[in-house]
Amino acid sequence: MARYIIKRILYILLVFIILSFLVFAIYNMIPNDKAAAQARAEVAANKNLKYEERYLYWQRTYGLDGNLFQRYFRWLGLYPYTAVDGSVGALNGMLQGNLGSSIDNGRPVADLIKEPMKNTIFMNIFATVLALGITIPLGIFCAVKRGSRRDVVVQIGTIVGYSMPVFIVAILFIWLFAVVLGIFPVSGMETPGNNFTGFRAFLDRMYYMALPLIVMTFCSLGGMTRYVRASMIEALSLDCIRTARAKGVKESVVIYSHAWRNALIPIVTLVIGWFLSIFSGSIMIENIFAYNGIGKVYFTALQNSDNEVVLALQMFYIFIALAGNLVVDLAYGFIDPRIRVSK
């Protein structure tokens, strides 16, 4: 197992380097030279300054001098910056915790995304727990009661929910729960001007997060329920299940021990893949509900051509996708002993 984990980590590093270079090269093709913008602003403010000197100064300050490969490895933190006087500077890239600075407001990217990252993770964990708590029992029930009226009703409902775009569901839920019923606020993260602390502040935050959380959970019910149902139907048709029933094993043991264990293999891929995908899928919901998460930050950075922020978040999405593949492979080995990941 240890050998397999090492091989997979090396594979992830290789893929990460390839993908990060491609993304970095693409964003470097965008005609947005912040060194030139700074130099022009300084020359416009002080006519005694020379544009070429100030441009070279800001190029070295931002690490934009040199060819594409030098800039890429400098951005990673594997190639030193060039000091203002032309000497060799220090390493100061991603590996050193420097994700660059936002062009829009001048703040370090690491500080800019810290709080939104916590908010997105906080909401996505709640959405995952709620979705799994509903879809797994519902999918098992539909598989066991396959063909019944209740199964047909659930299937029709899941098809409708699965077919509706996220923004349509969000608009409908805002109209119903915020406008008509007045239960939840339309947008925001907390009561304006409040001085809540402790548990009261937590309840206020949960109150504002409730509606986007309901939308995220509802949008995931259709696909996940149908996937769990299909996996359970396939597992219930296995020869080992028929043998267990022929031996007189209790139906609950057959369903929740034998069949569920076999159905878990494809479901693990779904659950982990869905949990990772909601980080990118929450972009729409966070913007609709004005929720301060990385999805909203990412969308705003794209609108303002803030490439440093976009590049950092894109690397985050790539990393969690690669890490998710590793987690899925390792989970297979724990769920099904027939899978020998050490070979």
Image: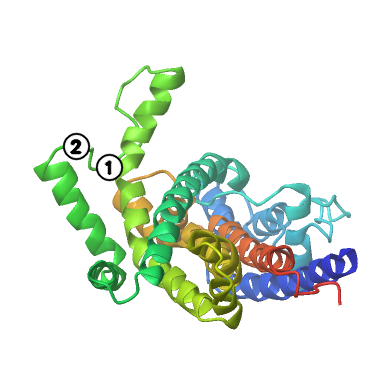
| Residue furthest to the left | 180
Judged left or right of residue 19, residue 3 is right
Q: Which residue is mark 2?
A: 183
Q: The residue under label 1 is which amino acid type?
A: Ser
Gap between marks 2 and 1, in whole Å?
12 Å
Camera-near label (2 vs 1) is 2
Please tell me in which quadrant of the rendered image residue 216 appears.
bottom left
Q: Residue at x 77, y 61 (%)?
A: 74
> Which quadrant would the N terminus be assigned to in this image?
bottom right
Q: Which residue is mark 1?
A: 187
Judged left or right of residue 18, residue 299 is left
Please tell me in which quadrant of the rendered image residue 167 appears.
bottom left
Residue 160: x and y in percent read 24, 71
Residue 188: x and y in percent read 31, 39
> Which quadrant would the C terminus be assigned to in this image?
bottom right
Q: Residue at x 57, y 58 (%)?
A: 313
Count up the numbered dots: 2
Q: Residue at x 56, y 52 (%)?
A: 43
Q: Residue at x 85, y 70 (%)?
A: 4
Seen in the picture, residue 244 relative to 324 is either above or below; the reply is below
Residue 39: x and y in percent read 59, 55
Judged left or right of residue 337, residue 238 is left
Secondary structure found at label 1: loop
Judged left or right of residue 289, residue 30 is right
Seen in the picture, residue 143 relative to 303 is either above or below; the reply is below
Q: The residue under label 2 is which amino acid type?
A: Ile
